[in-house]
Amino acid sequence: MVAPELIKVAAEGRSRWLVTKVNTEELPVLAQRFRVNSIPAFALLKSGREVARQAGAMPAQAIRQFLEQGGQTE
């Protein structure tokens, strides 16, 4: 459900951000490391540090807004 929206955002922001999708069932260690308790979960990393987090499905516009607002925090 979220995958097509992520594809849109990734294509639109190709030079601004890197969007990845992780299957937490296949990579439970990564899910534990980033404390993923619900799916879908969005984590915004900047310079290797988490700067924002959002749980729940979102349309492309909301994902883009999450990235833009979260990317402004230090």
Image (cartoon, helix red, strand yellow):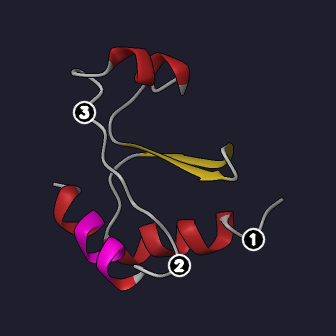
The kind of residue tagged 2 is: Arg
The kind of residue tagged 3 is: Asn
The numbered dot on residue 23 is: 3
The numbered dot on residue 72 is: 1
Counting other residues with Cα less than 10 Å from the Cα at mark 1, is it few (<14), some (14-19), or many (20 or more)?
A: few
Residue 18 in the image: state x and y as whole percent.
Answer: 44, 64
Q: Nearer the viewer, mark 2 or mark 1?
A: 2
Counting other residues with Cα less than 10 Å from the Cα at mark 3, is it few (<14), some (14-19), or many (20 or more)?
A: few
Above or below residue 16? Residue 44 is above
Which secondary structure class fits the magenta region best? helix
Circles 2 and 1 in contact, beta carbons < 8 Å: no
Q: Quadrant of residue 30?
A: top left
Residue 9 in the magenta stretch? The answer is yes
Residue at horizontal 32 percent and vertical 52 percent from the top: 57
Q: Is residue 17 left or right of residue 72?
A: left
The kind of residue tagged 1 is: Gln
What's the distance in space between the residues labelled 2 and 1, CA to CA? 12 Å
Magenta segment boundaries in residue numbering: 6-11
The residue that disc 2 covers is 16
Q: Secondary structure at mark 2?
A: loop
Q: Earlier in the sequence, mark 2 or mark 3?
A: 2
